[in-house]
Image (cartoon, rainbow, N blue to C red):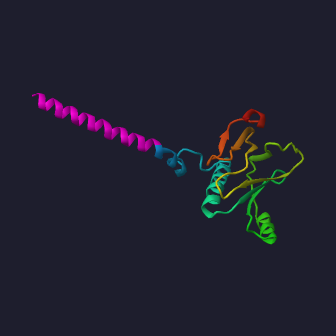
Amino acid sequence: MSKAKKISGFTLIELTVVISIISILLLFSFPLFRDLGLFSDSTGKVGDMVRLINDLKKRAVEKNVDFILHMDSGSGQVWVTDHAMEDEAKETAKEKATRLSDTITLLDVEFPGNKETGTREYQIRFNARGYSDFALIHIIEDDKNLTLKIEPFLSRVQLLDEHVYLEDCI
């Protein structure tokens, strides 16, 4: 009888270890599920901007190319260039720029150490080594203030449900 208890106790420990290992694996793989689009508004235009920025960070490392995201607050246009492009290709990219939705207004982009306020065109650099410029993109979508926070060493942009100033982040 005591042998049966040890055997059932031993299998209980094995079962606990197996469940613990599976739980740990799921814990680390859960961030990968965010890429499926199940947990975000896949039709939202702000979601498109977040996906574009996340994609640029990833592509810069994969292709070993520095990308630059251009944003024009006056016209609401967004386009991407890289260092390998010639001037003609950069002009073509600007002419084929994507216009932000009518429901989105780009207010400005804040950078550390840059107090310039009259700028209409902003540039955010995504380096091939995996880092980017620190930037806060202030937008309004359907009368709601939002901030996209791009941090240099994090792989994902953070969407904040308020207008966040640079002083609040440092």
Q: Residue at x 73, y 46 (%)?
A: 134
- Which residues make up the magenta segment? 1-27
Q: Quadrant of the N terminus?
A: top left
Residue 115, compared with residue 65, is above or below; it is above
Q: Looking at the image, which is closer to me, 162 or 111? A: 111
Q: How far across and down, in percent of the image, does residue 127 sit? A: 69, 56
Splitting the image into 4 quarters, where does residue 158 fall?
A: top right
Examine the structure image and report whether residue 159 is included in the region drawn in magenta.
Answer: no
Q: How far across and down, in percent of the image, does residue 49 sit? A: 68, 51
Q: Residue at x 74, y 64 (%)?
A: 83
Splitting the image into 4 quarters, where does residue 55 fall?
A: bottom right
In the shown orientation, is residue 11 left or right of residue 53?
left
Q: Residue at x 68, y 47 (%)?
A: 152
In the shown orientation, is residue 58 left or right of residue 69?
left
Splitting the image into 4 quarters, where does residue 162 fall?
A: top right
Q: Residue furthest right?
A: 118
Q: Residue at x 64, y 63 (%)?
A: 64
Examine the structure image and report whether residue 20 is included in the region drawn in magenta.
Answer: yes
